């Protein structure tokens, strides 16, 4: 039985088969839980290193702008989710003729964005440079997913792809999410987006995530929609599954 539990534990970061010490958990497991909880809390409160992020994307020849939501600081952002969905009134974005815009948003885990956003975009460019190379990149602070609607609308993009730090879990403080919205504008609902989540080496790897995101982006532009009306058939193969039109 012990060997079977050890095998199962090797397959998942989930807390299973923790054992017992009397009527409680073993001290090692209790300490590991406390450490995981601390890492998750740290991820929520950590700040994005903006200069490093901007440098990483400019090194890939992306035009980069930096903006902030109406949440002026982290405490406000956590208390007022609505303010994280709108750009600050002082923010101005330059329109870009590219059909796809990339919004790099700190979200609830700046750690995830810092670690995984640039490698994921690098994988997208390697996979389909005609779609992703030179797309406008906006690094956004204190942002929620819906901030991408405002960003995409101001850029005049047909499609906005928001790369955002997801809510940290006890086994994944650095999980990145990608949200795709066609014809972005204020008031879009979550039902009008497609999501690819848990992007990180220990979850959905960069290349696998890039294939799924690129398929969804191509399908969204071809059909003129995203969300519940756009089924993710990326696993069927790009050529066979890509919709021909609306």
Image (cartoon, rainbow, N blue to C red):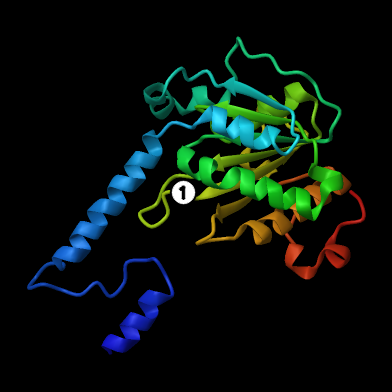
Residue 94, how many percent across, how many down?
A: 76, 18
Does residue 230 appear left or right of residue 200 in this picture?
right
Could you tell me residue 40's position as x and y percent? 35, 46
| The one of 184 and 44 positioned closer to us in this rendering | 44
Residue occupying the far right of the picture: 244
Total labels drawn: 1
Q: In which quarter of the image is residue 208?
A: bottom right
Name the quadrant containing residue 158: top right
Closer to us: 113 or 25: 113
Q: Could you tell me which secondary element the residue under label 1 belongs to?
A: loop
- Vertical comparison of 27 with 9: above or below: above
Q: How crowded is mark 1: few (under 14 residues within 10 Å), some or many (20 or more)?
A: many
Residue at the spot 52% in from the left edge and 46% down from the top edge:
115
Q: Which residue is found at the position 92% from the left and 55% from the top?
A: 244
Q: In which quarter of the image is the N terminus?
A: bottom left
In-image side of 75 versus 158 (left or right): left
Q: Which residue has dot 1 on it?
A: 174
* Residue in the picture at 74% in, 28% down: 63
Q: Is residue 63 above or below residue 176?
A: above
- Whole-percent x, y for residue 221 in the image: 84, 44
The picture places residue 239, in percent across and down from the top left corner, at: 88, 64
The quarter of the picture where residue 207 lies is bottom right
In the rendered image, is residue 41 in sight?
Answer: yes
Q: Can residue 185 be seen in this view?
A: no
Q: Which residue lies furthest to the left in this view?
A: 22
Residue farthest top in this picture: 90
Viewer-closest of 148 and 135: 135
| Residue drawn at 63 percent across, 37 percent down | 56
């Amino acid at each position: 039985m012990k060997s079977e539990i050890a095998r199962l534990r090797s397959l998942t970061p989930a807390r299973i088969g923790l054992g017992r010490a009397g009527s409680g958990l073993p001290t090692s497991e209790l300490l590991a839980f406390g450490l995981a909880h601390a890492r998750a809390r740290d991820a929520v409160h950590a700040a994005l290193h903006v200069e490093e992020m901007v440098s990483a994307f400019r090194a890939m020849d992306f035009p980069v702008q930096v903006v902030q939501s109406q949440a002026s600081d982290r405490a406000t952002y956590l208390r007022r989710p609505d303010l994280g969905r709108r750009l600050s009134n002082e923010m101005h974005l330059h329109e870009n003729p590219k059909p796809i815009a990339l919004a790099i948003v700190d979200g609830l885990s700046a750690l995830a964005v810092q670690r995984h956003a640039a490698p994921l975009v690098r994988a997208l460019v390697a996979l389909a440079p005609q779609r992703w190379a030179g797309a406008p990149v906006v690094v956004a602070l204190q942002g929620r997913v819906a901030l991408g609607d405002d960003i995409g609308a101001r850029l005049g993009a047909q499609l906005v792809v928001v790369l955002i730090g997801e809510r940290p879990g006890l086994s994944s403080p650095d999980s990145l999410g990608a949200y795709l919205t066609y014809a972005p504008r204020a008031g879009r609902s979550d039902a009008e987006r497609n999501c690819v989540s848990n992007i990180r080496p220990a979850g959905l790897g960069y290349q696998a995530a890039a294939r799924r995101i690129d398929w969804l982006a191509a399908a969204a532009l071809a059909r003129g929609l995203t969300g519940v009306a756009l089924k993710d058939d990326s696993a069927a193969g790009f050529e066979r599954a890509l919709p021909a039109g609306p």
